Image (tube, coloured by chain):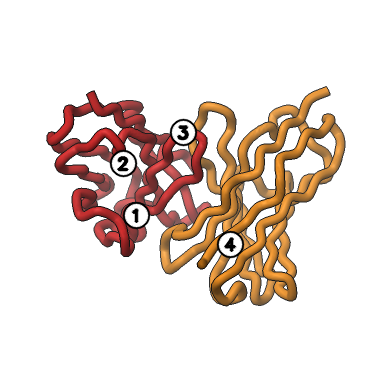
Amino acid sequence: QSALTQPASVSGSPGQSITISCTGTSSDVGGYNYVSWYQQHPGKAPKLMIYDVSNRPSGVSNRFSGSKSGNTASLTISGLQAEDEADYYCSSYTSSSPWVFGGGTKLTVL
Amino acid sequence: EVQLVQSGAEVKKPGESLRISCKGSGYSFTSYWISWVRQMPGKGLEWMGRIDPSDSYTNYSPSFQGHVTISADKSISTAYLQWSSLKASDTAMYYCARHNDDAFDIWGQGTMVTVSS
């Protein structure tokens, strides 16, 4: 099972909005509404930020939002803050593995 | 507090066996699957497999099937990841994570495994 495709890096200035994409196939992202997003700061365990494409767990800022169109899911962070600088990973249920992660995206806050 | 607490860092030689653990607390351990996730140094997350602690049913990623074994002891709310013969390429951080519906909502702190001669 190949990893989902994410951009290696994105950047933005404080206060701006950024979007991270996560591209899969009809066997994973496009076939199920089971896409989740994780934030990982250096040396720390991942943290769930979005589940089921667009739902936020309790305690996660509403600056984080998720969406999906076809085989591509997206994570949008609005009002960028310095503490948002981290690695972000998407994950999806698949018809084969049955779970797969994206390759990860490094977010830099300029 | 709902948490998963993993066993400490390990340093092993190639060919040795190893079992690391993940203890759940603050919730009904048998009500949620536990997955194991590998992160090699400087790399991304890789889903390895999962176990249903209520009956020890397991699923493995094709990439890890046959290379590791996932087990659980529900009497002590603990899941395990084990290797029978480690390789240098097994050097990585290993996380356990709880499934809540269709996402991994609680993560352990990670166990660093170093395999070196």
Q: Callout 2: residue from which chain?
A: A
Question: Chain B colour?
Answer: orange
Disc 2 to disc 1, C-alpha distance: 9 Å
As drawn, the label of residue B71 is: none
Q: Residues within 10 Å of mark 1 (few under 14, many from 20)?
A: many
Residue at point 78% right, 33% down?
B11
Residue at point 81% right, 34% down?
B12
Residue at point 61% right, 69% down?
B52
Q: Callout 1: residue from which chain?
A: A
A56 up-or-down from A76: above or below = below
User: Label 4, on which residue?
Assistant: B34
Between A31 and A40, the one nearer to me in the picture:
A40
Tell me the kind of residue under disc 3: Pro
Question: Chain A colour?
Answer: red
Secondary structure of residue under mark 3: loop
Secondary structure of residue under mark 1: strand
User: Label 1, on which residue?
Assistant: A35
Cβ atoms under marks 4 and 2 closer than 8 Å: no
Foreground label between 3 and 4 = 3
Residue at point 19% right, 28% down?
A12
Foreground label between 3 and 2 = 3
* Earlier-in-chain disc, 3 versus 2: 2
User: Label 2, on which residue?
Assistant: A22
**Left/right of residue B104 with respect to residue A37 in the rendered view:** right
Q: Position of residue B87 (x, y in %)?
A: 77, 31
Cβ atoms under marks 1 and 3 closer than 8 Å: no
Between A2 and B109, the one nearer to me in the picture:
B109
Instruction: Judge whether residue A32 can be spotted in this image.
Output: no
Disc 4 to disc 1, C-alpha distance: 18 Å
Foreground label between 4 and 1 = 4
